[in-house]
Image (cartoon, rainbow, N blue to C red):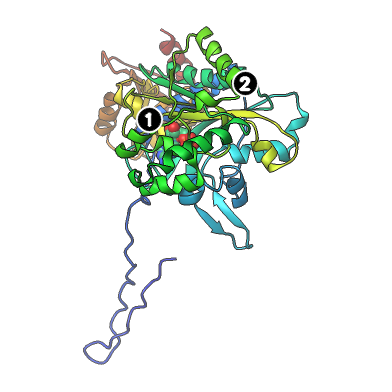
Amino acid sequence: MVKEKKPKKKPGKRGRPSKPRKPKLQKIKVQAPKGTHDILPQEQKYWDKVRVIVGNIANNFGFGRIDTPIFEDVRIYIKGTGQTSDIVQKEIYTFKSKGGEFLALRPEFTPGIVRAYIEHGMRNLPQPVKLYSIGPLFRHDKPQAGRYRQFHQINFEIIGDSSAVSDVQIIQVFVSILKKLNLKKFYLYINSIGCLICTPKYKKILLGYYRQRLDKICPDCHRRFKENSLRLLDCKKEKCQKIAKEAPQMIDFLCDECHGHFKETLEFLDELEIPYILDPYLVRGLDYYTKTVFEIWEDKEGNSQGALVGGGHYDNLVEMFKGKPNPGVGAAAGIERIINSLKKQDVKIPEGEKPRVFIIQLGDLGKKKSLKLFEEFQRNGIRVGEAFSKPSIKSQLKIADKEGTEMALILGQKEALEGNIIIRDMVSGAQETVSLEKVINEVKRRLKK
Ligand code: AMP
Protein backbone atom coordinates (compact mmCIF):
# COMPACT_ATOMS: atom_id res chain seq x y z
CA MET A 1 0.00 0.00 0.00
CA VAL A 2 1.24 3.49 -0.81
CA LYS A 3 1.64 5.47 2.40
CA GLU A 4 0.49 9.05 2.47
CA LYS A 5 2.68 11.50 4.32
CA LYS A 6 0.78 13.42 6.99
CA PRO A 7 1.00 17.18 6.35
CA LYS A 8 2.64 19.01 9.22
CA LYS A 9 0.54 21.82 10.66
CA LYS A 10 2.68 24.95 10.69
CA PRO A 11 1.49 28.15 12.31
CA GLY A 12 0.95 31.02 9.81
CA LYS A 13 2.39 34.55 10.08
CA ARG A 14 0.05 35.71 12.83
CA GLY A 15 -0.01 32.46 14.74
CA ARG A 16 -3.03 31.25 12.69
CA PRO A 17 -2.65 27.77 11.24
CA SER A 18 -1.73 28.04 7.56
CA LYS A 19 -3.76 26.28 4.82
CA PRO A 20 -3.19 22.52 4.98
CA ARG A 21 -0.82 21.46 2.22
CA LYS A 22 -1.83 18.82 -0.32
CA PRO A 23 -0.55 15.48 0.95
CA LYS A 24 2.45 14.30 -1.05
CA LEU A 25 2.12 10.81 -2.53
CA GLN A 26 5.19 8.67 -2.38
CA LYS A 27 6.55 8.41 -5.92
CA ILE A 28 6.54 4.97 -7.49
CA LYS A 29 8.44 3.71 -10.52
CA VAL A 30 6.01 3.86 -13.43
CA GLN A 31 7.33 0.73 -15.08
CA ALA A 32 6.16 -2.84 -15.59
CA PRO A 33 8.09 -5.36 -13.46
CA LYS A 34 11.38 -6.53 -14.94
CA GLY A 35 10.91 -9.27 -17.53
CA THR A 36 7.21 -8.50 -18.09
CA HIS A 37 5.64 -6.52 -20.89
CA ASP A 38 2.37 -4.89 -21.88
CA ILE A 39 0.64 -6.05 -25.03
CA LEU A 40 -0.55 -2.77 -26.52
CA PRO A 41 -3.56 -2.38 -28.86
CA GLN A 42 -1.37 -2.12 -31.97
CA GLU A 43 0.23 -5.50 -31.11
CA GLN A 44 -3.05 -7.31 -30.63
CA LYS A 45 -3.49 -8.21 -34.30
CA TYR A 46 -0.58 -10.65 -33.97
CA TRP A 47 -2.04 -12.18 -30.81
CA ASP A 48 -5.51 -12.46 -32.31
CA LYS A 49 -4.09 -14.13 -35.41
CA VAL A 50 -2.17 -16.68 -33.32
CA ARG A 51 -5.18 -17.42 -31.11
CA VAL A 52 -7.55 -17.87 -34.06
CA ILE A 53 -5.18 -20.17 -35.95
CA VAL A 54 -4.41 -22.23 -32.84
CA GLY A 55 -8.15 -22.58 -32.07
CA ASN A 56 -8.95 -23.71 -35.62
CA ILE A 57 -6.09 -26.18 -35.82
CA ALA A 58 -6.87 -27.58 -32.37
CA ASN A 59 -10.43 -28.10 -33.50
CA ASN A 60 -9.39 -29.77 -36.78
CA PHE A 61 -7.07 -32.17 -34.94
CA GLY A 62 -9.68 -32.97 -32.26
CA PHE A 63 -8.11 -31.24 -29.24
CA GLY A 64 -10.36 -29.85 -26.49
CA ARG A 65 -9.36 -26.66 -24.71
CA ILE A 66 -8.48 -26.84 -21.02
CA ASP A 67 -7.78 -23.84 -18.78
CA THR A 68 -6.06 -24.69 -15.52
CA PRO A 69 -5.33 -22.21 -12.68
CA ILE A 70 -2.24 -20.04 -13.01
CA PHE A 71 -1.12 -21.25 -9.62
CA GLU A 72 -0.94 -24.76 -8.22
CA ASP A 73 0.36 -26.53 -5.14
CA VAL A 74 4.12 -26.24 -5.49
CA ARG A 75 4.50 -30.02 -5.20
CA ILE A 76 2.77 -30.45 -8.58
CA TYR A 77 5.84 -28.87 -10.20
CA ILE A 78 8.44 -30.35 -7.87
CA LYS A 79 7.11 -33.79 -8.70
CA GLY A 80 6.09 -33.08 -12.30
CA THR A 81 8.62 -30.69 -13.79
CA GLY A 82 11.24 -32.28 -11.58
CA GLN A 83 13.43 -31.46 -8.61
CA THR A 84 16.58 -31.23 -10.70
CA SER A 85 15.15 -29.14 -13.55
CA ASP A 86 16.27 -25.51 -13.93
CA ILE A 87 12.64 -24.47 -13.65
CA VAL A 88 12.25 -25.88 -10.14
CA GLN A 89 15.78 -25.15 -9.00
CA LYS A 90 16.08 -21.58 -10.20
CA GLU A 91 13.05 -20.17 -11.94
CA ILE A 92 9.83 -21.03 -10.15
CA TYR A 93 7.90 -18.26 -8.34
CA THR A 94 6.60 -19.66 -5.08
CA PHE A 95 4.57 -18.05 -2.33
CA LYS A 96 2.76 -18.94 0.83
CA SER A 97 -0.91 -18.02 0.74
CA LYS A 98 -2.69 -16.37 3.67
CA GLY A 99 -4.18 -19.78 4.39
CA GLY A 100 -0.70 -21.26 4.69
CA GLU A 101 -0.71 -23.20 1.41
CA PHE A 102 2.60 -23.35 -0.42
CA LEU A 103 1.80 -22.38 -4.00
CA ALA A 104 3.68 -21.73 -7.24
CA LEU A 105 2.87 -19.57 -10.25
CA ARG A 106 2.55 -21.83 -13.28
CA PRO A 107 6.01 -22.17 -14.92
CA GLU A 108 4.82 -24.71 -17.52
CA PHE A 109 1.50 -26.29 -18.47
CA THR A 110 2.05 -30.05 -18.47
CA PRO A 111 2.04 -30.87 -14.71
CA GLY A 112 -1.16 -28.86 -14.10
CA ILE A 113 -2.88 -30.53 -17.05
CA VAL A 114 -1.85 -33.99 -15.87
CA ARG A 115 -3.16 -33.05 -12.41
CA ALA A 116 -6.50 -32.04 -13.98
CA TYR A 117 -6.55 -35.22 -16.11
CA ILE A 118 -6.27 -37.37 -12.97
CA GLU A 119 -8.51 -35.19 -10.78
CA HIS A 120 -11.38 -35.20 -13.28
CA GLY A 121 -11.16 -38.91 -14.00
CA MET A 122 -10.24 -38.37 -17.65
CA ARG A 123 -8.65 -41.78 -17.54
CA ASN A 124 -12.17 -43.17 -17.84
CA LEU A 125 -12.75 -41.37 -21.12
CA PRO A 126 -11.84 -43.00 -24.44
CA GLN A 127 -8.07 -42.71 -24.71
CA PRO A 128 -6.04 -40.82 -25.69
CA VAL A 129 -7.34 -37.52 -24.34
CA LYS A 130 -6.23 -34.57 -26.45
CA LEU A 131 -6.02 -31.21 -24.71
CA TYR A 132 -4.68 -27.77 -25.51
CA SER A 133 -4.18 -24.53 -23.58
CA ILE A 134 -3.12 -20.96 -24.16
CA GLY A 135 -2.07 -18.67 -21.36
CA PRO A 136 0.58 -16.95 -19.28
CA LEU A 137 3.50 -18.64 -17.54
CA PHE A 138 6.02 -17.32 -15.05
CA ARG A 139 9.73 -18.07 -14.74
CA HIS A 140 12.28 -16.06 -12.80
CA ASP A 141 14.99 -16.11 -15.41
CA LYS A 142 17.43 -13.44 -16.53
CA PRO A 143 15.42 -11.33 -19.00
CA GLN A 144 16.91 -11.13 -22.49
CA ALA A 145 15.74 -11.25 -26.13
CA GLY A 146 12.81 -13.70 -26.28
CA ARG A 147 13.15 -14.58 -22.59
CA TYR A 148 10.61 -13.05 -20.25
CA ARG A 149 9.51 -13.59 -16.68
CA GLN A 150 5.89 -13.56 -17.72
CA PHE A 151 5.34 -15.04 -21.16
CA HIS A 152 2.62 -16.94 -22.99
CA GLN A 153 2.53 -20.42 -24.41
CA ILE A 154 0.40 -22.51 -26.71
CA ASN A 155 0.45 -26.01 -25.27
CA PHE A 156 -0.81 -29.32 -26.69
CA GLU A 157 -0.93 -32.69 -24.90
CA ILE A 158 -2.04 -36.18 -25.91
CA ILE A 159 -2.46 -38.29 -22.78
CA GLY A 160 -3.11 -42.03 -22.75
CA ASP A 161 -1.20 -43.27 -25.78
CA SER A 162 2.36 -44.50 -26.04
CA SER A 163 2.57 -44.89 -29.80
CA ALA A 164 4.81 -42.92 -32.10
CA VAL A 165 1.79 -41.69 -34.01
CA SER A 166 0.82 -39.38 -31.12
CA ASP A 167 4.34 -37.94 -30.96
CA VAL A 168 4.11 -37.20 -34.65
CA GLN A 169 0.65 -35.72 -34.37
CA ILE A 170 1.89 -33.23 -31.77
CA ILE A 171 4.74 -32.26 -34.10
CA GLN A 172 2.31 -32.02 -37.01
CA VAL A 173 0.06 -29.66 -35.00
CA PHE A 174 2.93 -27.21 -34.37
CA VAL A 175 4.23 -27.43 -37.92
CA SER A 176 0.68 -26.69 -39.15
CA ILE A 177 0.38 -23.68 -36.82
CA LEU A 178 3.69 -22.19 -37.97
CA LYS A 179 2.85 -22.83 -41.63
CA LYS A 180 -0.62 -21.34 -41.29
CA LEU A 181 0.97 -18.27 -39.71
CA ASN A 182 3.06 -18.00 -42.89
CA LEU A 183 6.34 -18.32 -41.07
CA LYS A 184 8.66 -18.77 -44.01
CA LYS A 185 11.32 -20.96 -42.47
CA PHE A 186 11.75 -23.11 -39.38
CA TYR A 187 13.61 -26.32 -38.55
CA LEU A 188 12.59 -29.36 -36.56
CA TYR A 189 15.28 -30.98 -34.40
CA ILE A 190 14.60 -34.42 -32.96
CA ASN A 191 16.22 -37.02 -30.71
CA SER A 192 15.32 -39.94 -28.47
CA ILE A 193 16.54 -39.93 -24.87
CA GLY A 194 15.42 -43.51 -24.16
CA CYS A 195 13.44 -44.88 -21.26
CA LEU A 196 13.85 -46.06 -17.65
CA ILE A 197 15.56 -49.20 -18.97
CA CYS A 198 18.11 -47.84 -21.42
CA THR A 199 18.74 -44.28 -20.19
CA PRO A 200 20.36 -45.28 -16.85
CA LYS A 201 22.82 -47.52 -18.71
CA TYR A 202 23.67 -44.70 -21.10
CA LYS A 203 23.99 -42.21 -18.21
CA LYS A 204 26.60 -44.45 -16.57
CA ILE A 205 28.66 -44.40 -19.77
CA LEU A 206 28.19 -40.65 -20.16
CA LEU A 207 29.29 -40.00 -16.56
CA GLY A 208 32.35 -42.16 -17.13
CA TYR A 209 33.24 -40.02 -20.13
CA TYR A 210 32.74 -36.74 -18.23
CA ARG A 211 34.54 -37.97 -15.11
CA GLN A 212 37.76 -37.84 -17.15
CA ARG A 213 37.02 -34.24 -18.17
CA LEU A 214 35.69 -32.58 -15.03
CA ASP A 215 38.46 -29.97 -15.10
CA LYS A 216 37.27 -28.78 -18.52
CA ILE A 217 33.57 -28.13 -17.84
CA CYS A 218 31.73 -25.10 -16.42
CA PRO A 219 30.36 -24.91 -12.83
CA ASP A 220 26.79 -25.47 -14.08
CA CYS A 221 27.94 -28.68 -15.76
CA HIS A 222 29.53 -29.77 -12.49
CA ARG A 223 26.07 -29.51 -10.95
CA ARG A 224 24.56 -31.37 -13.92
CA PHE A 225 27.22 -34.07 -13.54
CA LYS A 226 25.89 -34.73 -10.04
CA GLU A 227 22.17 -34.18 -10.59
CA ASN A 228 21.07 -34.32 -14.21
CA SER A 229 23.73 -35.89 -16.39
CA LEU A 230 21.83 -35.79 -19.72
CA ARG A 231 21.80 -32.00 -19.56
CA LEU A 232 25.59 -32.02 -19.81
CA LEU A 233 24.96 -32.49 -23.52
CA ASP A 234 23.04 -29.28 -24.09
CA CYS A 235 25.24 -26.80 -22.24
CA LYS A 236 25.51 -23.65 -24.32
CA LYS A 237 29.09 -22.80 -23.22
CA GLU A 238 31.58 -23.23 -26.03
CA LYS A 239 34.12 -25.20 -24.01
CA CYS A 240 31.42 -27.62 -22.80
CA GLN A 241 29.97 -28.00 -26.30
CA LYS A 242 33.37 -29.16 -27.55
CA ILE A 243 33.34 -31.92 -24.94
CA ALA A 244 29.71 -32.85 -25.63
CA LYS A 245 30.49 -33.24 -29.35
CA GLU A 246 32.90 -36.10 -28.56
CA ALA A 247 30.63 -37.76 -26.00
CA PRO A 248 28.97 -41.17 -26.55
CA GLN A 249 25.50 -40.76 -28.06
CA MET A 250 22.21 -42.04 -26.65
CA ILE A 251 21.05 -43.28 -30.05
CA ASP A 252 23.68 -46.05 -29.87
CA PHE A 253 22.36 -47.25 -26.50
CA LEU A 254 18.57 -47.24 -27.07
CA CYS A 255 16.81 -50.45 -26.05
CA ASP A 256 14.83 -52.31 -28.72
CA GLU A 257 11.54 -50.72 -27.73
CA CYS A 258 12.90 -47.15 -27.78
CA HIS A 259 14.79 -47.84 -30.98
CA GLY A 260 11.63 -49.12 -32.67
CA HIS A 261 9.59 -46.19 -31.34
CA PHE A 262 12.08 -43.64 -32.64
CA LYS A 263 12.39 -45.36 -36.01
CA GLU A 264 8.62 -45.34 -36.39
CA THR A 265 8.43 -41.66 -35.39
CA LEU A 266 10.91 -40.75 -38.13
CA GLU A 267 9.09 -42.91 -40.68
CA PHE A 268 5.80 -41.12 -39.93
CA LEU A 269 7.52 -37.75 -40.29
CA ASP A 270 8.91 -38.89 -43.66
CA GLU A 271 5.42 -39.94 -44.70
CA LEU A 272 4.07 -36.50 -43.78
CA GLU A 273 7.01 -34.89 -45.58
CA ILE A 274 7.97 -32.99 -42.44
CA PRO A 275 11.73 -32.45 -42.69
CA TYR A 276 13.78 -32.99 -39.51
CA ILE A 277 17.35 -32.81 -38.29
CA LEU A 278 18.61 -35.58 -36.01
CA ASP A 279 20.23 -33.92 -33.01
CA PRO A 280 22.00 -36.27 -30.57
CA TYR A 281 22.63 -33.37 -28.17
CA LEU A 282 18.98 -32.44 -27.76
CA VAL A 283 17.85 -33.57 -24.31
CA ARG A 284 15.43 -30.81 -23.14
CA GLY A 285 15.32 -29.39 -19.66
CA LEU A 286 12.47 -31.26 -18.01
CA ASP A 287 12.86 -34.38 -15.92
CA TYR A 288 9.82 -36.29 -17.14
CA TYR A 289 10.68 -36.80 -20.80
CA THR A 290 11.36 -40.27 -22.15
CA LYS A 291 11.86 -41.39 -25.78
CA THR A 292 11.14 -38.64 -28.35
CA VAL A 293 12.21 -35.07 -27.63
CA PHE A 294 12.06 -32.29 -30.18
CA GLU A 295 12.41 -28.57 -30.72
CA ILE A 296 11.55 -26.23 -33.57
CA TRP A 297 13.95 -23.35 -34.25
CA GLU A 298 13.66 -20.41 -36.57
CA ASP A 299 17.31 -20.67 -37.60
CA LYS A 300 19.61 -23.59 -38.22
CA GLU A 301 22.53 -22.08 -36.34
CA GLY A 302 20.37 -21.34 -33.31
CA ASN A 303 19.58 -17.75 -32.38
CA SER A 304 19.52 -15.46 -29.42
CA GLN A 305 15.85 -15.90 -28.58
CA GLY A 306 16.03 -19.71 -28.41
CA ALA A 307 13.64 -22.39 -29.66
CA LEU A 308 10.13 -21.54 -30.84
CA VAL A 309 8.67 -24.89 -29.80
CA GLY A 310 9.82 -27.61 -27.43
CA GLY A 311 8.26 -30.89 -26.43
CA GLY A 312 8.51 -34.59 -25.94
CA HIS A 313 7.10 -37.92 -24.94
CA TYR A 314 6.53 -38.85 -21.28
CA ASP A 315 5.94 -42.45 -20.25
CA ASN A 316 5.93 -41.98 -16.48
CA LEU A 317 4.55 -38.56 -15.58
CA VAL A 318 0.95 -39.60 -14.90
CA GLU A 319 2.19 -42.60 -12.91
CA MET A 320 4.52 -40.33 -10.90
CA PHE A 321 1.46 -38.39 -9.71
CA LYS A 322 -0.81 -41.30 -9.08
CA GLY A 323 -1.38 -44.88 -9.95
CA LYS A 324 -1.19 -46.74 -13.16
CA PRO A 325 1.25 -46.18 -15.99
CA ASN A 326 -0.20 -43.82 -18.55
CA PRO A 327 2.04 -42.38 -21.23
CA GLY A 328 1.62 -39.08 -23.02
CA VAL A 329 3.28 -36.53 -25.25
CA GLY A 330 3.15 -32.76 -25.27
CA ALA A 331 4.77 -29.62 -26.58
CA ALA A 332 4.60 -25.88 -26.14
CA ALA A 333 5.42 -22.82 -28.20
CA GLY A 334 6.17 -19.35 -26.85
CA ILE A 335 3.77 -16.84 -28.39
CA GLU A 336 6.14 -13.89 -27.89
CA ARG A 337 8.88 -15.77 -29.75
CA ILE A 338 6.53 -16.71 -32.60
CA ILE A 339 5.46 -13.07 -32.93
CA ASN A 340 9.10 -11.91 -32.85
CA SER A 341 9.83 -14.35 -35.68
CA LEU A 342 6.80 -13.21 -37.70
CA LYS A 343 8.07 -9.63 -37.44
CA LYS A 344 11.65 -10.63 -38.20
CA GLN A 345 10.56 -12.55 -41.29
CA ASP A 346 8.36 -9.59 -42.25
CA VAL A 347 5.13 -11.60 -42.29
CA LYS A 348 2.29 -9.14 -42.81
CA ILE A 349 -0.76 -9.41 -40.59
CA PRO A 350 -3.65 -7.32 -41.92
CA GLU A 351 -5.08 -4.63 -39.66
CA GLY A 352 -8.53 -5.26 -38.22
CA GLU A 353 -11.37 -3.97 -40.37
CA LYS A 354 -11.94 -0.25 -40.00
CA PRO A 355 -15.46 1.22 -39.83
CA ARG A 356 -16.75 2.36 -43.22
CA VAL A 357 -19.26 4.77 -41.68
CA PHE A 358 -18.66 7.66 -39.27
CA ILE A 359 -21.17 9.60 -37.16
CA ILE A 360 -20.54 13.34 -36.84
CA GLN A 361 -22.55 15.29 -34.29
CA LEU A 362 -23.07 18.97 -33.56
CA GLY A 363 -24.79 20.63 -30.62
CA ASP A 364 -26.41 19.06 -27.55
CA LEU A 365 -29.38 17.53 -29.29
CA GLY A 366 -27.21 16.29 -32.16
CA LYS A 367 -24.91 14.55 -29.67
CA LYS A 368 -27.79 12.96 -27.75
CA LYS A 369 -29.41 11.59 -30.90
CA SER A 370 -26.02 10.42 -32.21
CA LEU A 371 -25.45 8.31 -29.11
CA LYS A 372 -28.80 6.63 -29.70
CA LEU A 373 -28.08 6.16 -33.41
CA PHE A 374 -24.67 4.65 -32.64
CA GLU A 375 -26.40 2.12 -30.38
CA GLU A 376 -28.85 1.24 -33.19
CA PHE A 377 -26.02 0.66 -35.64
CA GLN A 378 -24.40 -1.68 -33.09
CA ARG A 379 -27.62 -3.64 -32.82
CA ASN A 380 -27.74 -3.95 -36.59
CA GLY A 381 -24.18 -5.27 -36.64
CA ILE A 382 -22.74 -2.26 -38.49
CA ARG A 383 -19.50 -0.86 -37.10
CA VAL A 384 -19.47 2.92 -37.08
CA GLY A 385 -16.72 5.31 -36.12
CA GLU A 386 -17.27 8.28 -33.83
CA ALA A 387 -15.49 11.10 -32.07
CA PHE A 388 -18.20 12.09 -29.59
CA SER A 389 -15.74 14.04 -27.45
CA LYS A 390 -14.93 16.44 -30.31
CA PRO A 391 -17.34 19.36 -30.66
CA SER A 392 -16.29 20.79 -34.06
CA ILE A 393 -17.41 19.36 -37.37
CA LYS A 394 -14.00 20.09 -38.86
CA SER A 395 -12.06 17.99 -36.37
CA GLN A 396 -14.57 15.13 -36.66
CA LEU A 397 -14.41 15.14 -40.46
CA LYS A 398 -10.62 15.12 -40.24
CA ILE A 399 -10.68 11.95 -38.10
CA ALA A 400 -13.26 10.30 -40.38
CA ASP A 401 -11.05 11.09 -43.34
CA LYS A 402 -7.90 9.81 -41.63
CA GLU A 403 -9.61 6.49 -40.87
CA GLY A 404 -10.51 6.11 -44.53
CA THR A 405 -14.27 6.17 -43.90
CA GLU A 406 -16.51 6.00 -46.96
CA MET A 407 -19.57 7.70 -45.50
CA ALA A 408 -20.09 10.37 -42.84
CA LEU A 409 -23.47 10.78 -41.16
CA ILE A 410 -23.87 14.37 -40.00
CA LEU A 411 -26.36 15.06 -37.24
CA GLY A 412 -26.52 18.75 -36.30
CA GLN A 413 -29.00 20.67 -34.16
CA LYS A 414 -31.25 21.44 -37.16
CA GLU A 415 -31.29 17.84 -38.45
CA ALA A 416 -31.93 16.51 -34.95
CA LEU A 417 -34.96 18.82 -34.54
CA GLU A 418 -36.34 17.85 -37.95
CA GLY A 419 -35.67 14.11 -37.44
CA ASN A 420 -33.21 14.01 -40.35
CA ILE A 421 -29.52 13.25 -40.95
CA ILE A 422 -27.08 14.15 -43.73
CA ILE A 423 -25.25 11.35 -45.52
CA ARG A 424 -21.99 12.62 -46.96
CA ASP A 425 -20.02 10.61 -49.50
CA MET A 426 -16.45 11.08 -48.25
CA VAL A 427 -14.94 10.56 -51.69
CA SER A 428 -17.13 12.78 -53.90
CA GLY A 429 -18.29 15.13 -51.13
CA ALA A 430 -21.92 14.72 -52.32
CA GLN A 431 -24.48 15.13 -49.54
CA GLU A 432 -28.07 13.97 -49.18
CA THR A 433 -30.52 14.49 -46.33
CA VAL A 434 -32.53 11.43 -45.30
CA SER A 435 -34.94 10.75 -42.47
CA LEU A 436 -33.31 9.45 -39.27
CA GLU A 437 -35.72 6.52 -39.26
CA LYS A 438 -34.51 5.33 -42.63
CA VAL A 439 -30.80 5.97 -42.24
CA ILE A 440 -29.82 2.43 -41.19
CA ASN A 441 -31.50 0.85 -44.20
CA GLU A 442 -30.04 3.50 -46.49
CA VAL A 443 -26.52 2.90 -45.11
CA LYS A 444 -26.97 -0.87 -45.51
CA ARG A 445 -28.04 -0.34 -49.12
CA ARG A 446 -25.03 1.87 -49.87
CA LEU A 447 -22.57 -0.47 -48.15
CA LYS A 448 -23.77 -3.37 -50.28
CA LYS A 449 -22.96 -1.50 -53.50
P1 AMP B 1 9.74 -25.05 -22.41
O1 AMP B 1 8.45 -25.01 -21.63
O2 AMP B 1 10.91 -24.55 -21.63
O3 AMP B 1 9.94 -26.34 -23.08
O4 AMP B 1 9.58 -23.98 -23.57
C1 AMP B 1 8.71 -24.13 -24.65
C2 AMP B 1 8.68 -22.84 -25.43
O5 AMP B 1 8.22 -21.78 -24.59
C3 AMP B 1 10.05 -22.37 -25.88
O6 AMP B 1 10.42 -22.98 -27.07
C4 AMP B 1 9.81 -20.88 -26.03
O7 AMP B 1 9.18 -20.59 -27.25
C5 AMP B 1 8.87 -20.58 -24.90
N1 AMP B 1 9.58 -20.07 -23.70
C6 AMP B 1 10.16 -20.78 -22.72
N2 AMP B 1 10.67 -19.97 -21.78
C7 AMP B 1 10.41 -18.71 -22.17
C8 AMP B 1 10.66 -17.42 -21.61
N3 AMP B 1 11.29 -17.28 -20.44
N4 AMP B 1 10.25 -16.33 -22.30
C9 AMP B 1 9.60 -16.47 -23.47
N5 AMP B 1 9.32 -17.65 -24.04
C10 AMP B 1 9.71 -18.76 -23.40
Res 202 seen here: yes
The residue indicated by pointer 2 is 256
Where is residue 332 shown, x and y percent of the image?
50, 31
What label sits on residue 246 in the rendered view? 1
Q: Is residue 351 left or right of residue 327?
A: left
Q: Nearer the viewer, residue 253 or 340?
A: 253
Ligand 1: give its quadrant. top left
Rendered residue at 73%/32% (across/down): 122
- Label 2: which secondary element: helix
Extreme residue toward the right, this view: 124
- Label 1: which secondary element: helix
Vertical arrangement, residue 333 with respect to residue 440, above or below: below
Vertical arrangement, residue 151 with respect to residue 188, above or below: below
- Label 2 CA crowd tier, 10 Å (few <14, some 14–19, many 20+): few
Q: Is residue 206 left or right of residue 426?
A: right
Please, what is the three-letter code of the amino acid marked with disc 1?
Answer: Glu
Please, what is the three-letter code of the amino acid marked with disc 2?
Answer: Asp
Q: Is residue 63 left or right of residue 90?
A: right
